[in-house]
Image (cartoon, rainbow, N blue to C red):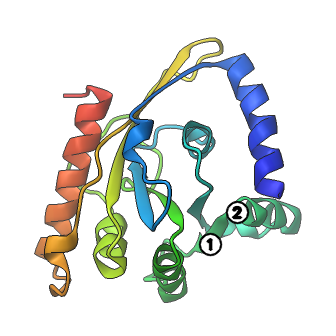
Amino acid sequence: MVYAIAKILAGIIFRLKFRIEVTGREHIPKSGGIILCANHAHAIDPILVGLAVKRKLQFIAKKELFENKALAALIGALGAFPVDRETTDIIAYKTAIKLLQNGEALLLFSQGTRRKTIDISNNKSGAAFFGIKARAPIIPVGITATYKTFSTVRIHIGKPINLDKYSGAKLKTELLNEVTEETMRQIIRLTGEK
């Protein structure tokens, strides 16, 4: 209920501020666990992706955002759960996998933090790890925007990257890097970056 109300309010506010263009919505299955993996240049990117897709999104947020009780209650109601970025956060990993196995849609940013440009190397392999473990496809999302008032925000949703061929494989660094790099190549293609 909170999510639906927040989405309506955010939709009104953000559509007054930006012209939002979305392509590729047809690539998102109506049900089943999926990972939306996008580039991340601005703090409002989670909201923009949330407005672009019809399904409710779950997402990982840095634990520092949960230190304020009011903010923690709000973002928790909007589908966020905390992660400690300084350590291997097993609780966050288990939460993400459980959500995917329960058929939820998870939003991740492979870059881990906000970056102006996309670098195919130096990315987090969480999407690859969760996707293989939970047998959930990764759907690349490219966001192109200046974020200036009244400018156009373009959100391009790519075709799912099916990970079935990795089912049962050992999650070695090389394998996770391979899947992560393929995902980033698709995101770069969707944004039109070189």
Please give the name of the residue rendered at 13% of the width and 63% of the height, measured from the top-left corner. 178
Amino acid type shown at disc 1: Pro
Residue 82 percent location from the top left of the image: 62, 72
Note whether 149 is above or below 95 in the view shown: above
Please give the name of the residue rendered at 29% of the width and 41% of the height, measured from the top-left corner. 187
State how many labels appear.
2
Q: Nearer the viewer, residue 102 or 98?
A: 102
Amino acid type shown at disc 2: Leu
> Contact, CB < 8 Å: mark 1 with mark 2?
yes
Residue reaching furthest to the top: 150
- Location of the C terminus by quadrant is top left
SS type, badge 2? helix
**Rounded to the nearest whole Å, what is the CA distance between mark 1 and mark 2?**
8 Å
Alpha-carbon neighbours of circle 2 within 10 Å: few (<14), some, or many (≥20)?
some
Alpha-carbon neighbours of circle 1 within 10 Å: few (<14), some, or many (≥20)?
many
Q: Which mark is residue 109?
A: none
Q: Which mark is residue 82?
A: 1
Quarter assignment of residue 33:
bottom left
Note whether 101 is above or below 138 in the view shown: below
Mark 2 lies on residue: 65
First of labels 1, 2 by sequence position:
2
- Location of the N terminus by quadrant is bottom right
